[in-house]
Image: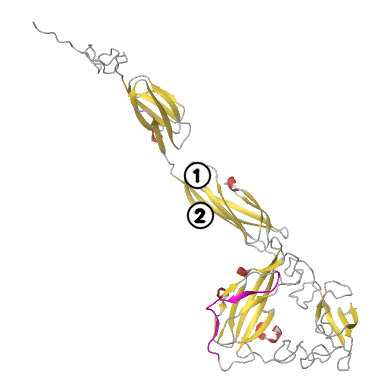
Amino acid sequence: MSCSSIPEAAGSCDQCFHFDLGSSNSPSDNFVPRTGIASGSYEFIYTAQSSITGTTYQGANVTPTGNITSLFNLTDRGVANNSWTWASMKSGSAIVKGTVPTTIDIGRPIYLLKFTTLSGIKDANNVIQPGQDVTHRECAFYYQTAPTAFCGNGNREGTEQCDDGNTVNTDACSNTCTNNSAGACGTQNNNSVYDQSAGTALVASTSGLCASGAVASFLYSPSQNRWTWSCAGSNNGASPSCQANRTYCGNGTIESTEQCDDGNTNNNDGCNTSCRIASIPSPAIRIYKDDADNRDDRQTITSGTRPRFTITVINYGNVDLRDVVVTDQRAPGCDKTIGTLARNDSKTYTCEGTTTTASFTNTARATGRSITDTTVVSDDDTTEVTVGATAVSCTVGASNKSGYAPLQTTLTCSGSPSGKTVMAVKKNGTTLELINASSKNYTFNNIGSYTVVCYPDGSQQNQGNACTTNIQVGSLCGNRKVEGAEQCDDGNTRSGDGCNQSCEIEYKIQPIC
């Protein structure tokens, strides 16, 4: 049905249909791929960017209305570029007719179901082809009672054998909508024949030029941009002259199945090389820089440590981007070259900043270039880094903390903040030795009580960042050395020889006579 005969379709519908509105309706919509798609490529629908809406007219109570896309199951592509049902109403959903005023104009619709699709082309590698996006609007008008069929409205209805949209009796379809006999013009008469070349032969199929039989003569008139021909045989005693406009994409006139024609074959100006409405390239990029833990755009770290970040770069424009890079002056470890980023694609990665001692606001920038021209796009995002109190820790250890001289042990020292680690071995408050290492095998040769002090940052004066452990070295009875509290040491641990097993002097009791 011609959209021009429906005032409600003015400027908002590319194709129109009419239906009776029953009490409950479960509609669907087919998508017909465009012609001329390269081998291996296919047309698909951006289902997330397509929509289905319901609108009522004349005060009719029909539901649902508004954006009702969620009530339909959507399919983004068919098989081998054949048409497919891209939208079908879900089970349990329906268009429901309620109260309709008795005063309505029955020649006008009471409800519109509008299917708006955005489609594109992908090649054999599933790569979206730039400049090929097309928007198409199909309008299903519902009436209390659909318009009565009549010959000449362009729709084959009832018992009609044909309906070519006119009541001319000398073409392929008579003024009573029956097929004419030989010699009559075919269905192409008074239509537009698509021809992309300027030659003298039709590029499109010659079928439909005559109702039956052969073409008797054929002529192209450049001045009128029109084909004329006659058909062999006669029709009702006449031999009509048939004609059709020659149409091609890029002549500046919207013809035949063209949705647009801007007088050129530029893919990037809203009307593509197939004269289908295309989205004008609109490159755009977005960057999100968050802390790497809970991604709330802020993090607190201890002084002397490195902040960690999560960065996401999104291409949310309608063209692919190239030369995509991320730069970050305060965190050069987050600089990254991404390269090409396809439309609706994203890239996420984690990175570290430099060692930090003061709070700051970090800003990262993403830039990219449209793959269709030289347009450069960029976006910034910030995240807060707060430096908290310095964490202090200290751990000192000894593998043996007590025993007899000579006592062998391994001393260890660690902590935070760390620097040049130093250990001090002390006895009675006096430093006997400084050890510039975090670990060392050490021998205590003399008995006594020792203190080992650990300085993780190498500063003996920073007592707040120091820790200690005690080492106890005792004497060994029986080593022939009088040590510590020993009274004697005769090299054994036998009693009865003047020096007992505890290295104490034995006194011999003389009998009294």
Q: Residues within 10 Å of mark 1 (few under 14, many from 20)?
A: few
Between residues 161 and 24, which one lies in front from this camera angle?
161
The residue indicated by pointer 1 is 358
Extreme residue toward the top, this view: 513
Between residues 38 and 268, which one lies in front from this camera angle?
38
Between residues 100 and 40, which one lies in front from this camera angle?
40
Location of residue 485 (image quadrant): top left
- Tag 2: residue type? Arg
Q: Is residue 91 magenta?
A: yes
Tell me if residue 10 can be seen: no
Q: Which residues are magenta?
A: 80-100
Q: Position of residue 250 (x, y in %)?
A: 80, 71
The vertical placement of 170 against 467, above or below, is below
The vertical placement of 356 against 150, above or below, is above
Location of residue 117 (image quadrant): bottom right
Between residues 43 and 418, which one lies in front from this camera angle?
43
The vertical placement of 158 against 434, above or below, is below
- Left or right side of 513 for 404: right
* Residue that appears at 85% across and 88% down: 184
Q: Residues within 10 Å of mark 2 (few under 14, many from 20)?
A: some
Distance in Å between CA atoms under marks 2 and 1: 21 Å
The residue indicated by pointer 2 is 295
- Left or right side of 314 for 227: right
